[in-house]
Image: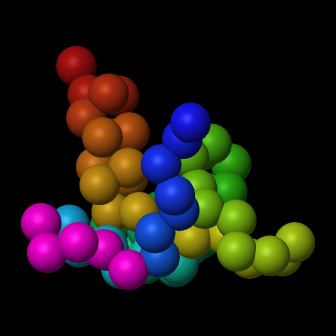
């Protein structure tokens, strides 16, 4: 049986603030439209709203580094 879904993090966990396309674009030095084209794994909040976890963006960027 799977663990119950928890919306409140435990003391050892912290929810990461989610980044907008504009914030990710600023970090990467690209235009916001390009963020959607890069296929960085995102969290879909609604049909028209995506957000990115900073740790996922960092891992994606490191995976692309040579």
Highlighted range, magenta = 8-12
Q: Residue at x 80, y 76 (%)?
A: 46
Q: Give the position of the C terminus as an image quadrant.
A: top left
The furthest residue to the front: 1
Q: Residue at x 62, y 42 (%)?
A: 39
Q: How many marks?
A: 0
Question: Residue 55, image x and y in percent?
Answer: 29, 55
The furthest residue to the left: 12
Q: Residue at x 26, y 28 (%)?
A: 65
Answer whether residue 65 is magenta in the image: no
Q: Residue at x 38, y 80 (%)?
A: 8
Q: Nearer the viewer, residue 56 or 61?
A: 56
Left or right: 3 as drawn, with respect to 49: left
Q: As displayed, is residue 19 above or below residue 43?
A: below
Q: Nearer the viewer, residue 34 or 5?
A: 5
Left or right: 12 as drawn, with respect to 48: left
Q: Give the position of the N terminus as an image quadrant.
A: top right
Q: Identify the colour scheme used.
A: rainbow
Left or right: 18 as drawn, with respect to 9: right
Q: Is residue 4 visible?
A: yes
Question: Residue 61, image x and y in percent?
Answer: 33, 41
Question: Residue 14, image x and y in percent?
Answer: 23, 73
Q: Nearer the viewer, residue 50 or 24?
A: 50
Our reading of the magenta stretch's main secondary structure is loop
Question: Residue 6, image x and y in percent?
Answer: 46, 69
The furthest residue to the top: 66
Q: As displayed, is residue 66 above or below residue 7?
A: above
Q: Is residue 33 visible?
A: no
Answer whether residue 10 is magenta in the image: yes
């Amino acid at each position: 049986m799977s663990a119950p879904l928890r919306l409140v993090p435990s003391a050892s966990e912290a929810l990461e603030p989610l980044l907008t396309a504009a914030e990710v674009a600023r970090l990467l030095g690209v235009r916001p439209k390009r963020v959607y084209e890069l296929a960085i794994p995102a969290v879909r909040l609604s049909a028209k709203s995506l957000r990115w976890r900073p740790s996922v963006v960092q891992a994606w960027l490191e995976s692309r580094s040579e």
